[in-house]
Amino acid sequence: MVQSIVFAVVALLALGFAYFQFSKVAANIRLGKDEAVTGPAGERWKNMLLVAFGQKKMFKRPIPAILHFMLYAAFVFTQIELIEIFIDGIFGVHRWFLGPLGGMYNFIISTIELLSVLAFVATAIFLIRRNALYIPRFHKPEMKGWPKLDANLILVFELILLACIFTMNGTDVVLQDMDPDHYRPTNFAVSGVFGPMVFGGMEASTLYTLERVGWWGHLLMVFVFLNYLPKSKHLHILLAFPNTYFARLKPRGEMINMPEVMNEVKSMMGLGDPNAPEPDMSAELPEFGADDVNEMSWIDVLGAYSCTECGRCTAVCPANITGKKLSPRKIVMNVRDRAEEVGGKIRSGNMEFAPDKEAPLSGSNFDDGRNLWDYITREEIHACTTCNACVEACPILINPLEMINKMRRHEILTEAAGPADWRPLFNSIENQQRAWSVGTSRTAWTQES
């Protein structure tokens, strides 16, 4: 009874705090502008099942893909044992699934154990790859400090979790001979051999303690992991699924037109709607593109929070390869960092950030004097060749190019700025509807006899 009460309190506190943290992430994603989700739902489900669940794009690099799949498969199957821990903790029973499942229970736990061994091997290799080997995409400037620590922390958490699982199962196997009424006989593939080798010969009291340490350790590491996710790149474990579902279905290379600009161009070329009302020349000019997260789409911000920081986008970026400052991964990480900053300041309730002091502080009533240009330099976005290599490389369908293009559009169209060698081109297109500024009329050739 005491353990059930303690379990309930710990679980409620951990799950409640996790809900609070995930709700902040959701609020930050909603800072982005509305964007309609278009295209067939079947195609979206296909993306989610193949790319997020099936990890299809990961296998373009087979070795890390196989290692990652070992971890992923162990993570998925271990949830079965976690469900049992919840049942045991609430009702004060021990291995409740063993009764209704019988021999199938041994098969399930043995599968989990074998996958856990593979996960242990993969985790060790990942730690070596990140810390002992020099893999360029793990050592870019944006990966210093917290991103590197974050990547290592989750691997250490994984090792602790695996140690707890095998401690729990290994001591359980030995205790079955000492207390068969409570520890019912099992036949686990790994613990059946490993348990007696490591824990055989220990006193019953020590084994009871170690079994509970493993049981509680497994549970607490899951709660630590759950509450750590919202601050970690490993949030992609959850967000990869909605991100692949909501990813834009347009063909590679097709850019999203801005209706304001498209309608203006059509009007200039005589292709506009003749019944459309005359534009209000006194109206305030719209903002084009994006210079902050509230002008990015919510799909872009969701992508930023889904980023795995794997660096595959940066590894294939021709600008980065040739020594330019652009790193698509950094752009995505910067969008997420700015969303965190804006969301935190809005939740602070500090009216210093509210332009309209009479209205509540919100995404639309917020100005802290900063924007994405405080995170991303103009040199970075100018270096992009819009080749879509980063979009193709992303294992969970994030589109860094869309974010870059929106910032470029803001710079060119709203600020009337940009590189000096770009401006004559844009001025000529705007004033003469052609790329090159020449003295003759564009239609002069039609008048020649």
Image (cartoon, rainbow, N blue to C red):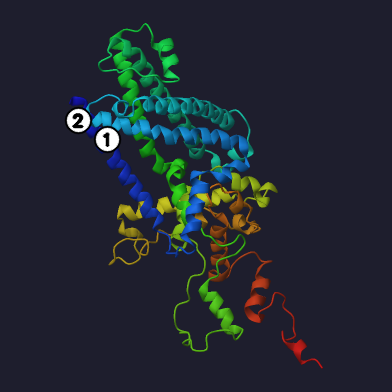
Give the labeled residue for mark 2: 5
Looking at the rendered structure, the secondary structure element under dot 2 is helix
The reply to whether residue 335 is in sight is no
Q: Which residue is mark 1?
A: 11
Q: Residue at x 59, y 31 (%)?
A: 129
Residue type at mark 1: give it.
Answer: Ala
Give the left or right position of residue 300, taking residue 227 as reference: right
Q: Earlier in the sequence, mark 2 or mark 1?
A: 2
Locate residue 291, reporting x and y percent.
Answer: 50, 62
Reply above or below: 104 against 398: above
Q: Which corner quadrant of the image does residue 447 belong to?
A: bottom right
Check the image and report above or below for 242 versus 423: above
Q: Are marks 2 and 1 in contact (CB under 8 Å)?
A: no
Q: Considering depth in this image, is 338 or 332 the residue closer to the camera?
A: 332
Quadrant (top left/top right/bottom left/bottom right) for the N terminus: top left
Identify the residue at horizontal 42%, vertical 16% (top origin). 192
Q: Is residue 63 left or right of residue 363?
A: right
Q: From the viewer's perspective, is 162 left or right of 377? A: left
Within-10-Å neighbours for mark 2: few <14, some 14–19, many 20+: some
Q: Where, quadrant-wise, is the C terminus in this rendering?
A: bottom right
Q: Is residue 83 above or below residue 387?
A: above
Q: Report whether 51 appears left or right of 316.
A: left
CA distance for labels 2 and 1: 10 Å
Question: In the image, residue 230 lies at what x, y percent?
Answer: 39, 43
Q: In the image, what residue occupies the spot 37% across and 61% down? A: 363
Q: Secondary structure at mark 1?
A: helix
Outermost residue to the right: 449
Is 178 in front, or is 373? 178
Q: Residue at x 37, y 52 (%)?
A: 26
Q: Position of residue 212 (x, y in %)?
A: 30, 20
